[in-house]
Image (cartoon, rainbow, N blue to C red):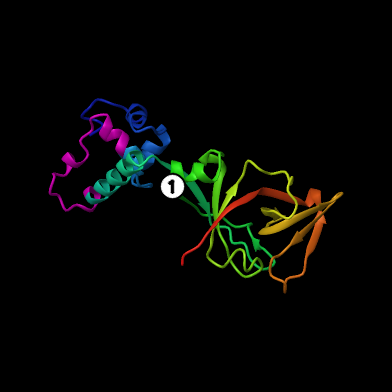
């Protein structure tokens, strides 16, 4: 396909909006192409399905059809990407020194704007784990974090933070150079740390759960 058009890897990758490195990985089969890449190629006149035939049962052709469908839906419904980090927030916190898996979800722009004026690229999703913040945050809840807010201006609000390699969600109460970390579960005692020990990821602005 690329060779037939007389294009090198850099130029063909540019048609799909990716770097030459990504294009090389796609061609080597090391990384599967994403929906946006395939949609851009299709928009630039590359007949992806035509490579296999409209009725092809090839797994590659099926994946291309699914990817194109996802990309078209993203554009048609004006969806915005928000990354989810697999960082558990639970009793006593969760260690984060290992690799952090990142997934991307897409939400309607209008829905995000009804919650916050912060751009989607500064928002992050995490999942509640454990019971330290019960009843406010339950195990499995979706937590939307605004990473543009990293200074505690509102006492007792919910904040995502790390101390060393431990991630957690707590209510914060600033007292001079000390910061109290409060849990909503009455059985979990409060803790505190020097403000220089705490890295604030962002403020929790939305909690969603299955019913």
Reply yes or no: does residue 52 show up in magenta: yes
Name the residue furthest front.
114
Q: Where is residue 147 in the image (x, y as percent from the top left)?
A: 62, 44
Q: Residue at x 23, y 33 (%)?
A: 46
- Secondary structure at badge 1 equals strand
Q: Which residue is drawn at 72% across and 43% down?
A: 151
Q: Position of residue 92 (x, y in %)?
A: 70, 66
Residue 134 versus residue 48: which sits nearer the camera?
134
Name the residue furthest bottom.
187
Q: Where is residue 90 in the image (x, y as percent from the top left)?
A: 63, 66
Reply yes or no: does residue 100 show up in magenta: no
User: What's drawn in magenta, residue-wise?
Assistant: 39-61
Q: Residue at x 47, y 65 (%)?
A: 210
Q: Name the residue under label 1.
A: 107
Q: Which residue is drawn at 64% across and 57% down?
A: 97
Does residue 156 lie above or below 211 as drawn?
A: above
Residue 58 versus residue 45: which sits nearer the camera?
45
Name the residue furthest right.
176
**In which quarter of the view is residue 169 placed?**
bottom right
How many neighbours does mark 1 have within 10 angstroms: few (below 14), some (14-19), or many (20 or more)?
some
Does residue 121 lie above or below 8 as drawn?
A: below
Residue 57 versus residue 156: which sits nearer the camera?
156
Q: Position of residue 61 (x, y in %)?
A: 22, 48
Apparent side of residue 40 relative to residue 160 in the rendered image (left or right): left
């Amino acid at each position: 396909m690329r060779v037939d058009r007389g294009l090198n890897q850099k130029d063909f990758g540019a048609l799909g909006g990716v770097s030459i490195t990504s294009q090389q990985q796609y061609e080597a089969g090391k990384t599967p192409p994403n929906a946006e890449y395939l949609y851009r190629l299709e928009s630039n006149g590359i007949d992806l399905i035509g490579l296999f035939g409209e009725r092809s049962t090839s797994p590659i052709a099926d994946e291309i059809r699914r990817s194109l469908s996802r990309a078209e839906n993203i554009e048609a419904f004006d969806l915005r990407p928000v990354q989810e980090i697999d960082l558990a927030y639970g009793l006593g916190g969760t260690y984060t020194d290992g690799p952090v898996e990142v997934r991307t979800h897409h939400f309607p722009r209008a829905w995000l704007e009804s919650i916050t004026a912060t751009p989607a690229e500064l928002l992050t999703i995490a999942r509640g784990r454990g019971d330290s913040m019960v009843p406010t945050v339950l195990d499995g809840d979706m937590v939307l974090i605004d990473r543009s807010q990293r200074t505690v201006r509102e006492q007792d609000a919910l904040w995502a933070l790390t101390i060393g390699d431990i991630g957690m969600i707590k209510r914060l109460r600033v007292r001079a150079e000390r910061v109290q970390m409060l849990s909503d579960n009455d059985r979990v005692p409060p803790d505190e740390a020097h403000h220089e020990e705490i890295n604030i990821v962002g403020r929790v602005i939305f909690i969603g759960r299955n019913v």
